[in-house]
Image: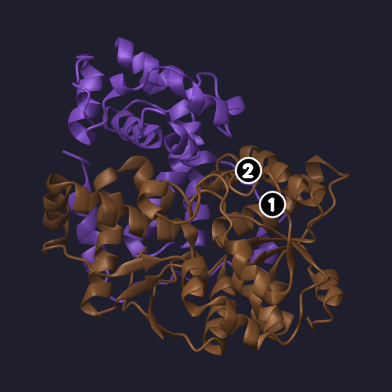
């Protein structure tokens, strides 16, 4: 299976362990990734919050690059990139006036037949059975809280992916590793996203609620599919601990890292040592190596 | 979008012509505000800002901190019984406020967005150190994140040098031609 790959900016920096782990896991699952040549940033929150045309044109350029590489499917592992790519495509195809403006900006006709998919959708295509057949380390002793955040599922009319209020597709994939998944209340609550720098107080408040609910429901680990969610939930536990000294840390892993552990990769290969919250105890619970 | 647009105030007309969003679709049930994760950081609830626009209190709406505190999580848009895309409305409000030169009460958020987009315009991709440098110089929040920044550098999560795209021209052109937003 060959799939187009749009890593996005975070996966080359703050979320580089997501890229590391994903590439290794996909190669074990016989998925070949073909990166888009000279892709540019999707504009993320800052573009759509301040300049609508720009926020559609930047993803449109990347979609056109994918089109030129004849990619049928394009994986955007970052939930924010996924949302911007699929959202722009949707808007352009439903608004002829906007399409004209985008074509004026890009100086070429826009057409995109590439299907934009997120990481859960790719793993669904790979299939639970395939993952199961390759499991080397059973995760049966750990309980996982699957965190979807905002941008994998919303708006549902655009993503057409899972249920916007109570998604369950990540739980279904994870069941292939033997891990148990917990029922909890905050799987689609916002972590504060791009407020991480300008309004850290908002992010620490929202993230603390998410972390607490996961722990309250018995989770040993939170699994995410977004580098922005990851840095808010993992790195910001430092700031949370300062504000609430009784806060007990809980590790936060990317979906690709959790699956990587089950497929027998060690913590370093997956970049788990790059997190702020230590996951050594978690790895010991399943007798995996750091 | 079947409802006829008839609020007929300056801002509601502007929003409608730029985005096709009709503020009269909102019947003020307040469900958006009930589910808003950042409501308690706001003075005006999200539905109140829509109400201001419905009634023609344009300045009140455009200067409300609510439009900048909105985290763009889209919970409101997902739940609105009238299918009014309130998250998109908040985007349009921010853009309109910026185009009108209105000073946002949440200056730091605006400076963050500006600094972020500057990196993209110059490098084609996000450059975190440049972003932090530009943002700190503008806001003078110089000591922010000293508890995590050195470790991020050590872990290689903050790139010292920008990751430039090979060909910077197309991205610069997109920025130049998108200036002025929807107009």
| Chain seen in brown | A
Residue at the extreme front of the image, as rendered? A129
Query: Residue drawn at (34%, 41%), measured in percent from left and top?
Result: A50
Side of A16 where A249 appears, left or right: right
Residue A205 appears in the figure: yes
The numbered mark 2 sits on a residue in which chain? Answer: A
Q: Quadrant of the C terminus of chain B?
A: top left
Of mark 1 and mark 2, the one earlier in the sequence is 2
Seen from the viewer's position, the closer of residues B145 and A232 is A232
Other residues around mark 1 within 10 Å, as few (<14) / some (14–19) / many (≥20) = many
Q: Is residue B88 above or below residue B42?
A: below
SS at mark 1 in the image: loop
For chain B, the rendered hue is purple
Q: Are marks 1 and 2 in contact (CB under 8 Å)?
A: yes
Residue A43 appears in the figure: no
Residue with the mark numbered 1: A236
Q: Which mark is residue A273?
A: none
Residue with the mark numbered 2: A203
Question: Are discs 1 and 2 located on one and the same chain?
Answer: yes
Q: Quadrant of the N terminus of chain B?
A: top left
């Amino acid at each position: 299976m060959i799939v187009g790959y749009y890593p996005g900016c975070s996966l080359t920096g703050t979320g580089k362990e997501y890229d590391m782990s994903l590439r290794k896991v996909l190669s074990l699952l016989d998925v070949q990734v073909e990166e888009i040549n000279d892709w540019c940033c999707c504009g993320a929150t800052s573009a759509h919050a301040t300049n609508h045309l720009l926020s559609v044109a930047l993803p449109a350029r990347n979609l056109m690059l994918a089109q030129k590489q004849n990619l049928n499917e394009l994986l955007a592992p970052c939930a924010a990139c996924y949302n911007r790519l699929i959202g722009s495509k949707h808007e352009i195809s439903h608004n002829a006036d906007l399409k004209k403006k985008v074509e004026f900006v890009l100086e070429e006709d826009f057409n995109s037949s590439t299907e934009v998919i997120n990481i859960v959708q790719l793993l669904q295509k790979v299939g639970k059975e395939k993952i199961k057949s390759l499991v080397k380390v059973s995760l049966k002793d750990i309980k996982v809280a699957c965190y979807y955040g905002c941008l994998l599922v919303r708006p549902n009319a655009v993503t057409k992916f899972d249920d916007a209020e109570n998604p369950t597709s990540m739980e279904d994939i994870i069941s292939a590793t033997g891990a148990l998944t917990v029922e909890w209340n905050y799987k689609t609550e916002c972590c504060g996203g791009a407020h991480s720098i300008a309004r850290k107080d908002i992010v620490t408040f929202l993230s603390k609620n998410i972390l607490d609910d996961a722990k309250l429901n018995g989770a040993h680990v939170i699994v995410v599919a977004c580098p922005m969610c990851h840095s808010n939930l993992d790195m910001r536990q430092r700031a949370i601990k300062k504000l609430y000294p009784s806060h007990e840390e809980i590790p936060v892993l990317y979906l690709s890292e959790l699956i990587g552990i089950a497929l027998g990769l060690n913590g370093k290969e997956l970049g788990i040592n790059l997190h702020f919250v230590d996951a050594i105890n978690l790895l010991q619970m399943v007798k995996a190596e750091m | 979008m079947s409802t006829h647009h008839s609020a007929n105030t300056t801002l509601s007309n502007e929003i409608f012509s730029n985005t096709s969003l009709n503020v009269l679709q909102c019947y003020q049930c307040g469900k958006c505000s009930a589910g808003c994760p950042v409501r308690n950081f706001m003075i005006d609830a999200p539905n109140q800002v829509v109400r201001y626009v419905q009634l023609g209190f344009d300045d009140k709406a455009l200067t409300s901190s609510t439009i900048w505190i909105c985290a763009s999580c889209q919970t409101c848009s997902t739940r609105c019984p009238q299918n009014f895309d309130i998250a998109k409305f908040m985007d349009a409000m921010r853009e309109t406020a910026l185009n009108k030169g209105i000073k946002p009460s949440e200056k730091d958020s605006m400076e963050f967005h500006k600094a972020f987009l500057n990196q993209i315009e110059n490098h084609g991709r996000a450059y975190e150190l440049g972003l932090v440098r530009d943002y700190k110089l503008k806001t003078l929040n110089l000591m922010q994140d000293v508890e995590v920044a050195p470790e991020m550098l050590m872990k290689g999560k903050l790139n010292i040098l920008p990751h430039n795209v090979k060909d910077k021209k197309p991205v610069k052109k997109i920025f130049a031609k998108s200036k002025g937003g929807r107009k």
